[in-house]
Amino acid sequence: MRVHVADHPLITHKLTVLRDKNTSSPVFRSLTEELMTLLAYEGTRNVRVEPVTIQTPVAETQGVRIGDPKPLIVPILRAGLGMLEGMVKLVPTAEVGFLGMARDEETLEPTTYAERLPDDLSDRQCFVLDPMLATGGSLAAAIEFLFQRGAKDVTAICILGTPEGLEAVEKAMAGREITIVLGALDERLNEHGYIVPGLGDAGDRLYGTV
Ligand SMILES: O=P(O)(O)OC[C@H]1O[C@H](OP(=O)(O)OP(=O)(O)O)[C@H](O)[C@@H]1O
Ligand SMILES: O=c1cc[nH]c(=O)[nH]1
Ligand SMILES: [Mg+2]
């Protein structure tokens, strides 16, 4: 499992405001989107491209373009939805699939309540978006879902992660290769399964406590 933790003052600056409990929901939403755009730069480092020849006003030259099959972006509802626009802005030709997952507050076990994904993911590059990698249960279940559909190339982009969560995901992957990009690796999980220092409940801060 490859793990990349972003190390950039602009990301740390935006994360600091995101973590602040006094940050309002509208600001939280726009910061989540901006952070996603910054993390997408690292997360798409290995996005598949194909060569293309174009004509500049001066000469013919070679470049690349994101071709087919299109990358598949998979936000994990709810909180991952807050990252979607930031990613789509950078990769506008990507397709978007959805996984709805909720963690039981007591057992911390995730359940999947919605799914809208292609049946065959064997030739797709998949980019899973979820701001929080806490116990790792939700991300591991989401990636397992993609593997069951044949995915072989999976990158997860998360805003915050924990050492415990990374370890759990690595164990669940059982040697299968994935990449995880994090905005920051936080200290630990608390006894309620929350990331410390973290930012609280990302879904609630984005969308309220429905
Ligand atoms: O690593 P884990 O311990 O599994 O926790 C992380 C999960 O918890 C949050 O979702 P939540 O279940 O709160 O759903 P929500 O996005 O609807 O708020 C978060 O967005 C992750 O999906
Ligand atoms: O700290 C946490 C842990 C799980 N989910 C969240 O939204 N926040
Ligand atoms: Mg939540």
Image: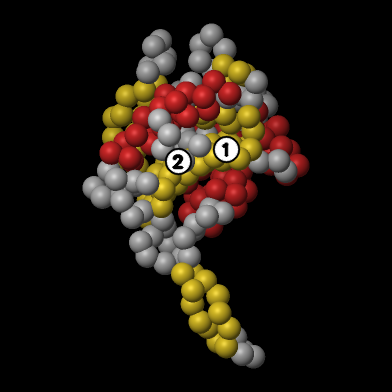
Rendered position, 90 above or below 11? below
Give residue 73's position: percent from left, percent from top: 42, 49
Give residue 187's position: percent from left, percent from top: 65, 21
Rendered position, 133 above or below 117? above
Rendered position, 160 above or below 41? above
Which residue is depicted at the point 67% across and 35% down?
15
Amino acid type for the residue under numbered disc 2: Glu
Q: How packed is label 1: few (under 14 Cα within 10 Å), some, or many (20 or more)?
A: few
From where the camera sits, is residue 167 visible? yes
Label pair 2/1, CB-CB below 8 angstroms: no
Query: 67 or 172: nearer the eye?
Result: 172
Q: How is the image coloured?
A: secondary structure
From where the camera sits, is residue 29 visible? no
Amino acid type for the residue under numbered disc 1: Val
Q: Nearer the viewer, mark 2 or mark 1?
A: 2
Q: Secondary structure at mark 1?
A: strand
**Residue designated by label 2:** 177
Query: 115 or 187: nearer the eye?
Result: 187
Q: Secondary structure at mark 2?
A: loop
Quadrant of residue 148 within the rendered picture? top left
Left or right, residue 27 beside residue 202: right
Which residue is depicted at the point 43% across and 34% down?
175
Left or right, residue 119 beside residue 192: left
**Residue designated by label 1:** 3
**Quadrant into which the C terminus falls:** top left
Give residue 66's position: percent from left, percent from top: 46, 65
Q: Residue furthest front?
A: 175
